[in-house]
Image: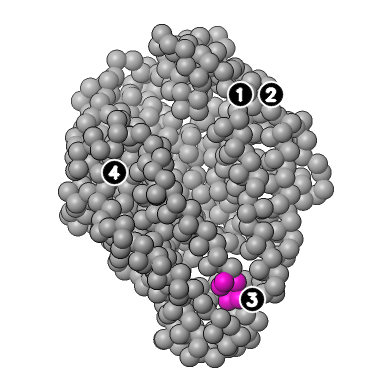
Amino acid sequence: MKREQVKERYKWKIEDIYPSDEEWEKDFENLQSRLDFSAYAGKLGDKETLLKFLKANDKFNYTLERVYVYAHMRHDEDAGVSKYNSYYLKVSAFASKCATELAFFEPEMAGQSEEYLNSLLTDKRFSDYDYSIKRLIARKPHVLSESEERIIGMSGEILGAFYDSFSMIDNLDLPLPEIEWEGEKVKLSHGLYGVILHSDDREKRRECYEKYYSAYTGLINTLTSVYYGNVKKDVFLSKVYKYNSCLEHALFEEDVDRVVYDNLIKAVDDNLPAMHRYIADRKKILGYDKQYFYDIYAPLVDGVSVKYSYDDAYDLVIKGLEPLGKEYLQLLRKGYEERWVDVEETEGKRGGAYSIGVPGAHPFVLLNYTPTLSDVFTIAHEMGHSLHTYYSQKNQPFAKSDYKIFVAEVASTVNETLLLKYMLRQATDENLKKYLLNYYLDSIRATLHRQTMFAEFESKAHSLAEKGEPLTKEVLCDLYAGIGKKYYGDAIEHDYNISCEWARIPHFYRSFYVYKYATGLTAAINIAKRILEEGEPAVKDYFKFLSGGASTDPVSLLKLAGVDLSKTAPFEVAMAEFEQTLTEFERLMNI
């Protein structure tokens, strides 16, 4: 389908950012003429000058975000439109130039005395910047000189080349073969691989799995080199910035204590028997003598056909999120009626789904909606992101409105959890209940267990490199295989293909991200549980979190919603949720 064939009400109203391309061009041109902060350099030790700089920087970045998001969204509507490709490339290059222009700020501030920096925290004029100033004080031992920071900034594209190299291999050069699917010869792709692995045709799953992994194992030496290069880059940066480890560096950037990471891995490790039980249940339900990794997504419940039009799906989401109160539901309806969402899959449109915020306007959501249960949950997920952004921007000054990635997946997953609980309560068909319980189990397994397994692999691979041990393909595959056997247990066959799975995980080429999915779901399970059990007091606390933006560290923000990830209790609650769901599923399945 071409974009012009889509009904207007299913397209996002991008005019809410700029009414025309001409207005965007005018703002972008004006912004380029304002990129000169040299008058402030060397003078930030004076409070008046510093305050003027911070206000000017806010004003500049406010407009920069608007022009960037508009170009980004136009580009994502149809990558084949050269005009918008040009917009996006120009504004991306300009954003990099801005970062270089402002490279003087952090080294100069780090050079100020702690007495001066602490005095800013008690000066009400700097209240919009108190958290960022606290972070500056904490970062002082790790900040380089201005010339050194400029060199690191200028090397950004080089340091990011490992991820770019993997992306080129994975998206363009991976030698995926043709297979026969639904009566046609088609080239195997990442998307089709996922579709086939969720099908009930075991022979096709096996064929697809083996051919898919043969493409990666055939390039395992190259992928090892790229991954090892990325790890060595992380080791280099952690040493340059004077951290004790790559993990310490990554956690510091998110302002997250190491205890959170350790709590996650320990809780999941301690509760692996329930995971092993689920894998064994799958084998029993499927009736296999031997279960392989190409069976891990096979459907367990037959006879369930769940299809929703976009309009019906959105209505279902609203009903499922009723516990969040009238104001939240009104905003959901506003998003639907006032076209915050771009719905249809069209030629040239970016795949997948995302939510994006923009100063001075409402958030937007990109979908490629299909009438499946999974996409119903995608609506709930992306609108969770959007309303988190909405509340943060509404309640925080611009300087504090952009929350950290560590908490980015919480609101989206709260929405998914509440919707699933609603659907379970409403389900009268026992088969549908089984299907939903299985969906929930697989969601927790994929987001909490699997991402924690990834996090454990990342941590151990980086530790080996920090000790000077070379990361050969044998070392990496043996490491991954050992961790995989621990997580999945004996009810599944661990073959060479799966020992190489690390090589195809995109997030491994941008290190220490995956654990945030697991902590996000942990927090969400706890928040949703409290909302359903306690009602309005829990909702009020949750809204404090949604409104917090970047006003303090992310772990403290979650405490506002009643979740303290520095303790083990929230992780135990999440693990108990998995086991209780499994027990109910087993009861309905007569296992």
In the image shown, does 107 or 59 lie closer to the viewer? 59
Measured Cα–Cα span from mark 2 to mark 1:
9 Å
Residue to which mark 3 is pinned? 107
Question: Of the residues tagged 4 and 3, which is closer to the observer?
Answer: 4
Q: Is residue 186 visible?
A: yes
Left or right of 262 in this view: 283: left
For label 2, the crowd category at 10 Å Cα-Cα, with few meaning under 14, some 14 to 19 and many 20 or more, is few
Residue to which mark 1 is pinned? 175
For label 1, the crowd category at 10 Å Cα-Cα, with few meaning under 14, some 14 to 19 and many 20 or more, is some
Measured Cα–Cα span from mark 2 to mark 4:
39 Å
Q: Which mark is residue 342?
A: 4
Q: Is residue 528 visible?
A: no
Instruction: Magenta stretch: give its range.
Output: 101-107
Kindly state the secondary structure of the residue where label 2 is placed.
loop
Amino acid type at image mark 3: Pro
Which tag, 4 or 1, sits closer to the chain's start?
Answer: 1
Q: Are marks 2 and 1 in contact (CB under 8 Å)?
A: yes
Would you identify the image quadrant in which residue 583 lies?
top left
Kindly state the secondary structure of the residue where label 3 is placed.
helix
- Image quadrant where one finds the C terminus: top left
Q: Up-down: is 41 above or below 566?
A: below
Kindly state the secondary structure of the residue where label 1 is placed.
loop
The residue drawn where x is 33% and y is 34% is 346
Amino acid type at image mark 4: Asp
Which tag, 2 or 4, sits closer to the chain's start?
Answer: 2
Question: Of the residues tagged 3 and 1, which is closer to the observer?
Answer: 1
Kindly state the secondary structure of the residue where label 4 is placed.
strand
Residue to which mark 2 is pinned? 218
For label 4, the crowd category at 10 Å Cα-Cα, with few meaning under 14, some 14 to 19 and many 20 or more, is many
Amino acid type at image mark 1: Pro
Q: Is residue 322 magenta?
A: no
Q: Are marks 3 and 2 in contact (CB under 8 Å)?
A: no
